[in-house]
Image (cartoon, rainbow, N blue to C red):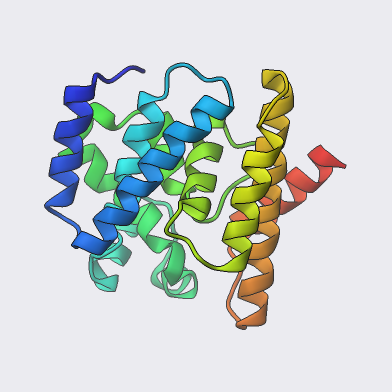
């Protein structure tokens, strides 16, 4: 799906009305990172990635109660207990009804998939979903050591090579980010979402 620059600019303005300046600055950095990643991956058309990046945190600053309600509405969680257990990732799920209702032009299954899984990851991510997942983790505002290492890994491994080699590097970078995310959550005594566990198993087997 192709979106012209005017359409994307209008989307950015609309999203900015719903987010704080700091959250919007992160959103713009994720969008920029997604575009740079597409260049590295030899992907000529990346406007769908940009749209997904602009929408990925749409529900981030909604109240937990509203996020919970929206996630239940979208049937991405089964009950309130599940929502509370995985509260840090709930905003990705909660964004789906908002996108379908308020931004129907961008409510393709590919974009919705990328927004839904941008925090947890999932097995066998499409290139679009993987790009948004990793761009969120490695955008230049991310200062934690693991984010910096993941960013360096991706750009080092995609400096040259065929597109298939660079796409494998994307998978390797995704696996690195998943492993570090799980290790951090484990260290904090936080629940690891089942989608993250499944994604880890998938990418470990893929790259073995």
Question: Is the residue 18 above or below the residue 185 in the image?
Answer: above
Location of the C terminus (image quadrant): top right
Q: Furthest residue to the right?
A: 208
User: Image point 13% across, 43% down: which residue?
Assistant: 14
**Residue 165 appears at what percent x and percent y?**
74, 25
Question: Is the residue 19 above or below the residue 3 in the image?
Answer: below
Residue 44 appears left or right of 24: right
User: Image point 59% across, 26% down: which residue?
Assistant: 41
User: Image point 41% across, 24% down: which residue?
Assistant: 46
**Residue 55 appears at what percent x and percent y?**
30, 44
Location of the N terminus (image quadrant): top left
**Residue 21 appears at what percent x and percent y?**
20, 60
**Residue 66 appears at what percent x and percent y?**
23, 66
Residue nearest the viewer, comparing 188 with 122: 188
Residue 43 appears left or right of 80: right
Residue nearest the viewer, comparing 159 with 132: 159
Question: Is the residue 162 above or below the residue 20 in the image?
Answer: above
Residue 120 appears left or right of 33: right
* Badge count: 0
The answer to whether residue 73 shows anywhere in this view is no
The image quadrant of residue 83 is bottom left
């Amino acid at each position: 799906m192709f979106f012209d620059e005017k359409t994307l600019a209008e989307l950015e303005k609309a999203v900015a009305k719903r987010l704080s300046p700091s959250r919007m600055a992160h959103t713009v950095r994720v969008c920029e990172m997604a575009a740079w990643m597409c260049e590295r991956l030899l992907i000529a058309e990346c406007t769908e990635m940009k749209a997904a990046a602009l929408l990925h945190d749409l529900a981030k600053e909604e109240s937990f109660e509203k996020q919970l309600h929206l996630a239940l509405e979208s049937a991405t969680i089964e009950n309130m207990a599940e929502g509370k257990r995985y509260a840090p990732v709930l905003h990705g799920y909660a964004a789906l009804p908002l996108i379908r209702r308020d931004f129907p032009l961008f409510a393709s299954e590919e974009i919705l998939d990328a927004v839904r899984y941008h925090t947890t990851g999932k097995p066998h991510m499409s290139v679009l979903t993987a790009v948004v997942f990793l761009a969120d983790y490695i955008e230049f505002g991310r200062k934690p050591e693991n984010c910096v290492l993941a960013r360096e890994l991706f750009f080092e491994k995609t400096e040259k090579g065929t597109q298939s080699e660079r796409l494998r590097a994307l998978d390797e970078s995704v696996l690195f980010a998943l492993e570090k995310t799980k290790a951090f959550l484990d260290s904090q005594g936080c629940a690891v979402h089942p989608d993250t566990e499944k994604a880890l198993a998938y990418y470990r087997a893929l790259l073995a």
